[in-house]
């Protein structure tokens, strides 16, 4: 059962980049992010109150700390990365965006070293980070290195937007780890609610209120809100309670693979060889960084 939930999570999150591509056929990138977060917030708020969690309280200093963490999570896990990815996918393929997400656990390593008590970089973690970062360089510069194609400024900015989104996710991960004890569903619902408050004004200011949209774009936003955002959060909660965070971390290996496969099969996206090589290097770096060194006393 745990492996089934893990596989479903990997597939759903990997398919989110397809959802963004579909949504962009009728909406602007910030509107896509705002619609996704707002609908998901409504769903999770209903779920949270239906099962007795509700929103975190605001009666004690610890409660206010929780809300501060919810604000940070809203900014770095919802508003910024969803907006950056949607804008980036105006130019890059969904496969590229998916592969860039493999970098999230690598960015977590140095952040944890400086911000999380008891988390320290060791030789394996440093080696894994450096090895995996080589994959990031290959991912961004592969077109120029192997195909001799000039790197346009727009393409470079779009690629950097996707990588920056992965860095935002890493920061959001640290914020979540440092949050005082709170219901996962309450925390996620609060973060999505605050994220929608951040995104809606920006979307209206930058792109206006949508006057019309095709059914494909509407379906794309609906999919993004329901499955990769709302349902995935509920599944994540179930899996963490059943199998624990270390088991959940295995999903990091699945998401980019599903994203590349779905992009190639459904959208018929070109799959440059350096994408696969970069993905392999990043995943090997991730594996090295998560390995435990075995020391033997003489």
Image: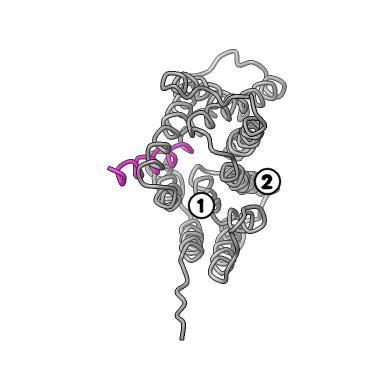
Of the two numbered discs 1 and 2 on the same chain, state the one appearing first in sequence: 1
Q: Position of residue 224 (x, y in %)?
A: 47, 29
On the rendered structure, is 239 left or right of 213? Answer: left
Quadrant assignment, res 193: top right
On the rendered structure, is 218 left or right of 144? Answer: left
Categorize mark 1 by other alpha carbons within 10 Å: few (<14), some (14-19), many (20+): many
Q: Residue at x 47, y 59 (%)?
A: 283
Mark 1 → mark 2, Cα distance in angstroms: 19 Å
Q: Which residue is mark 2?
A: 157
Quadrant assignment, res 86: top right
Q: Position of residue 150 (x, y in %)?
A: 66, 55
Q: Which residue is mark 1?
A: 102
Quarter of the image where the N terminus is located: top left
Q: Residue at x 56, y 57 (%)?
A: 106
Q: Nearer the viewer, residue 295 or 255?
A: 295
* Farthest left residue in view: 1
Q: Nearer the viewer, residue 245 or 285?
A: 245
Q: Which residues are magenta?
A: 1-17
* Farthest front residue in view: 60
- In the rendered image, the vertical position of residue 207 relative to residue 176, given as above or below: above
Quadrant assignment, res 33: top right
């Amino acid at each position: 059962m745990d492996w089934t939930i893990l596989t479903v999570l990997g597939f759903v999150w990997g398919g989110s980049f397809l959802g963004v591509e579909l949504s962009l056929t009728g909406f602007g990138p910030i509107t896509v992010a705002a619609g996704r977060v707002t609908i998901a917030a409504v769903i999770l708020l209903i779920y949270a109150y239906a099962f007795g969690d509700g929103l975190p309280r605001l009666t004690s200093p610890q409660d206010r700390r929780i809300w501060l963490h919810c604000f940070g999570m809203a900014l770095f896990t919802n508003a910024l990365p969803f907006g950056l990815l949607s804008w980036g996918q105006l130019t890059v393929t969904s496969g590229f965006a998916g592969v860039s997400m493999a970098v999230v656990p690598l960015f977590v390593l140095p952040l944890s070293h400086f911000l999380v008590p008891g988390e320290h970089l060791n030789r394996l973690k440093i080696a894994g980070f450096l090895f995996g970062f080589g994959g990031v360089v290959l991912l961004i510069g592969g077109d120029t290195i192997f195909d001799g194609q000039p790197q346009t400024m727009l393409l470079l900015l779009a690629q950097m937007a996707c990588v920056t989104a992965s860095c935002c996710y890493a920061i959001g991960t640290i914020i979540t780890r440092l949050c005082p004890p709170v219901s996962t569903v309450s925390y996620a619902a609060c973060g999505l609610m605050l994220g929608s408050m951040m995104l809606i004004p920006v979307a209206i200011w930058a792109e206006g209120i949508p006057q019309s949209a095709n059914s494909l774009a509407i379906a794309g936003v609906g999919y993004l809100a329901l499955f990769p955002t709302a349902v995935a959060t509920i599944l994540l909660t179930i899996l963490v309670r059943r199998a624990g965070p270390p088991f959940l971390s295995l999903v990091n290996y699945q998401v980019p693979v599903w994203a590349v496969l779905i992009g190639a099969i459904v959208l018929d996206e070109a799959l440059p060889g350096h994408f696969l090589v970069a993905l392999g290097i990043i995943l090997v770096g991730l594996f090295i960084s998560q390995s435990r060194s075995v020391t033997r006393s003489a």
